[in-house]
Image (cartoon, rainbow, N blue to C red):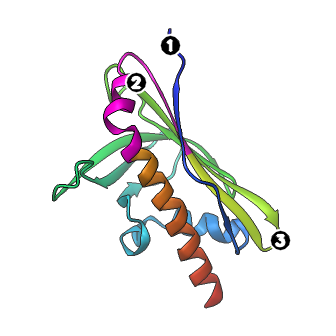
Amino acid sequence: MTAPHIITSVTVEIEAPAAFVWDVLVDYPRYPEWNPYTVAVETSLELDDRIDLTLNNPDGSEGTFVNREFIRIVDPPHHLRYDTGDEMEGIHAIRDQWINELGPDRCSYYTTDTLSGEHAGLVMELNGEWVRAGFDSVAYALKARAEALIRTT
């Protein structure tokens, strides 16, 4: 068995309380307004329920695709996890999103994707950089969105 491949975003510090940032992170109907990587999400956020993530095509061409995963951990305002379950043969991906309190009005955010299975190496080779860049764009956009919204409250 090979070691899993891990993709980690940048860590951003956000000038807003962790609970406020959590609310922005899980306000899925507003994703088209600010999220450049995951342009739409459908989920109930109930454990083991599906989460359908709509992403732009990795090659930059017009269009989107839907990646179905399943909610595994919902721990507001700190940790959200979902994974691919048995949706993709030969690949298992676990996505973790972390919000860490740095004080009453500050927190940090980063996300990881842990890939394992027979095709994990190939997925990393073909799409690893695209995923990392997408995760980084989410981190920066979440920071910008939360800080803009907190100033108007």
Three-letter amino acid code of the residue under disc 1: Thr
Measure the alpha-carbon separation of dots 1 and 2: 9 Å
Quarter of the image with the C terminus in it: bottom right
Q: Is residue 124 above or below residue 77?
A: above
Three-letter amino acid code of the residue under disc 3: Pro
Query: Percent position (x, y) of residue 75?
Result: 67, 50
Three-letter amino acid code of the residue under disc 2: Ala
Q: Which residue: 46% across, 60% down?
A: 137
Residue found at the very far left of the displayed protein: 62
Residue under label 3, please give it.
Answer: 104
Measure the alpha-carbon separation of dots 3 and 2: 39 Å
Q: Which residue: 37% across, 46% down?
A: 130
Q: Is residue 47 above or below residue 105?
A: above
Residue under label 2, please give it.
Answer: 120
Residue found at the very far bottom of the displayed protein: 152
> Mark 1 near mark 2, Cβ–Cβ under 8 Å?
yes
Residue under label 1, please give it.
Answer: 2
- Tag 2, which secondary structure? helix
- Mark 2 surroundings: few (<14), some (14-19) or many (≥20) residues within 10 A: many
- Tag 3, which secondary structure? loop
State the extent of the magenta-drawn residues as a range: 112-130
Q: Is residue 115 magenta?
A: yes
Of callouts 3 and 2, the N-terminal one: 3
Measure the alpha-carbon separation of dots 3 and 1: 41 Å
- Mark 3 surroundings: few (<14), some (14-19) or many (≥20) residues within 10 A: few
In the foreground, 67 or 1: 1
The image quarter in which residue 73 lies: top right
